[in-house]
Amino acid sequence: MTIFSKIIAGEIPCHKIAENEHFIAFLDIFPLTKGHTLVVPKIEIDKLFDVPDEYLTDLLVFAKPIAKAIEKAYPCNRVSILTVGLDVPHAHIHLIPMNRTSDMNLQNEKLKLSNEELLEVKNNILQFL
């Protein structure tokens, strides 16, 4: 069972942004920028392109209003999608507010936000969702 499956099952807490029967979105606890959110299918499949087609389509539809809310909460040039998946073998996408390409570099130093700061980020996004 992956850490994401444990979050989905409610065994590990998260700063949830949105959820439906197929997906959950929550803040990355090691964000590149404020607003950095993970969108995760509830089915545990390692690679994004092994996810069933209907999930792939719905993943972007689910992520779209979240990305729009992030963009309003944290004005940026765009909210980009990053797919890596090497750290957690459970398909997911990163929604990252960015102003320049270097904002998407996972080698950048991550923000160290307190639980209170993460809650503030969550509430900033939720007011636009």
Image (cartoon, grey):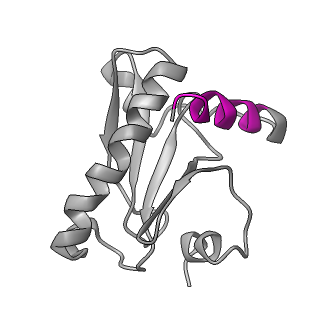
Rendered location of residue 37, percent (x, y): 51, 43
Residue at image location 28% in from the left, 50% down from the top: 61
Q: Which residues are magenta?
A: 117-128
- Residue in the picture at 59% in, 72% down: 8
Residue 113 spot, x, y in % from top left = 74, 34
Q: Is residue 83 visible?
A: no
**Residue at figure coordinates x 36%, y 75% from the top left:** 46
Say whether residue 80 is left or right of residue 106: left
Above/below status of 7 relative to 32: below
**104 with respect to 108 (left or right):** left
**Drawn side of residue 122 relative to residue 102, left or right:** right
Is 109 one of the magenta-colored residues?
Answer: no
Task: Please state the horizontal and vertical placement of residue 112, each as a whole percent of the image.
Answer: 72, 34
Labels in figure, total: 0
Q: Residue at x 55, y 32 (%)?
A: 35
Q: Position of residue 11 (x, y in %)?
A: 73, 76
- In the figure, residue 23 lies in which quadrant? bottom left
Find the residue positioned furthest to the left.
53
Residue sitting at the far bottom: 1
Front position in the image: 48 or 88: 48
* Image vertical order of residue 40 relative to residue 52, above or below: above
Magenta segment main secondary structure: helix
Q: Which residue is at the front of the view, 94 or 18?
A: 18
Q: Is residue 71 above or below residue 22?
A: above
Q: Is residue 123 above or below residue 74?
A: below
Q: Quadrant of the N terminus?
A: bottom right
Determine if the magenta segment contains residue 125: yes
Residue 45 shows in the view: yes
Q: Nearer the viewer, residue 100 or 56?
A: 56
